[in-house]
Image (cartoon, rainbow, N blue to C red):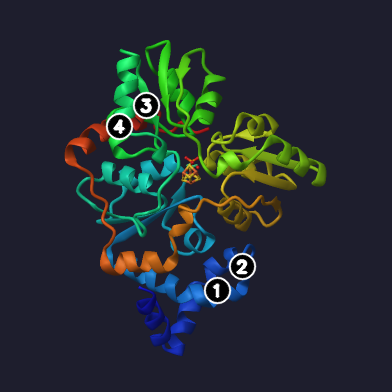
Amino acid sequence: MADRMESLLESAPPAAAARALEETDAALERWKRVLPENDWPAHAPYIAEIRRLKRERNAVLLAHNYQMPEVFHGVADLTGDSLALAREAADVDAGVIVVCGVHFMAETAKLLNPSKTVLIPDPDSGCSLADSITAEDIRRLRARHPGVPVVTYVNTSAAVKAESDICCTSANAVEVVESLDSDRVIFLPDEYLGRYVAGRTKKDLILWKGHCEVHEKFTGSELCAYREDYDGLMILAHPECPPGVLAEADYVGSTAGMIREVAKRVPRRVLLATERSMSDNVAAQFPEIEFVRPCYSCPHMQRITLPKILDSLQNLRHVVEIDPVVAGRAREAVRRMLDLAPRTIR
Ligand code: 13P
Ligand code: SF4
């Protein structure tokens, strides 16, 4: 693939390369606030070609908030948190959906669009939470706790969703748990999100020991140290962080919730206790705010690069397929979540 990319760049005549730069100027305006301007000429031909191919293929590109800025600002049609992407996927008109995110997000898009072509530029972009639990684990838990409903976080495989009663995201987890007619709920697989929810409901939650490999790196003492170093710092944290981190935060919520809170409060200084690229993406939108950026990146999100997106559109790969029986049951669990609280956001 590297050869094809090189030939694409080399074969671009100077006029075409200049046009690519011109066409991508609006994105550059946002992007140059957060990344070296010198990188732009390398990205511009990819961005211009990806945009052209999107039109040709009638494709729409969904990007999670953790995508790198050149993807997020350069080529995405719709951006957001897992809940927003699931909703957007349910409403998409285009015949081809390219998901710039991790594999479970592409599966969710496919569940909601069984007749459309859903592509993921790198099928190996996994997630430590999704990898922490299997469908068999859920069947065993159900046998141990008969009649107790199962809520699974969307950060799971379709096979796991198929074993669940209802899904949730970090934006609606409390509401989903509260909606169930049972005093006990099995909540999987994120232990820390589960503990966060348990603190906001009277229901008894049975948890699993899954963790996000990125958010579990943050510590409360690290955030205290940042507060001492940066006067007036506002700390916003994702509920996948350990409890000591959430206790130190001024706000806890989904990635979309954090962005909304920053937009509402416009603090002088901000630290987002979450994946690093999101700070770059949000900083590009709020030049007046100073972003303090701990360097914890999600290696799976970063697998989605401009060359891979171009390859995905050129060759219509990698197509996301789900066994129809599994898909039918998993879709029900996602649909129940979307029907429950169409606009609930935290
Ligand atoms: P959000 O649903 O808040 O976007 O989070 C998804 C995720 O993977 C967090 O690590
Ligand atoms: Fe999974 Fe964590 Fe990456 Fe989110 S940041 S996709 S939870 S590994």
Instruction: Select label 3 or label 1 by which is in front.
Output: 1
Instruction: Select label 4 or label 3 by which is in front.
Output: 4
The residue wearing badge 1 is 40
Name the residue type under label 4. Ala
Q: Nearer the viewer, residue 57 or 202?
A: 202
For marks 4 and 3, the one nearer the N-term is 4
User: Which element carries disc 3, helix, strand or loop?
Assistant: helix
The quadrant where residue 327 appears: top left
User: What's the mark number on residue 83?
Assistant: none
Which residue is painted at 42% across and 86% down in the image? 10
Rendering coords of residue 312 (x, y %): 32, 64
Apparent side of residue 315 relative to residue 170 in the rendered image (left or right): left
Q: Nearer the viewer, residue 219 or 76?
A: 219
The residue wearing badge 4 is 135
The residue wearing badge 2 is 32
Label 3 neighbour load within 10 Å: few <14, some 14-19, many 20+: some
**Mark 4 in CB contact with mark 3 (< 8 angstroms):** no
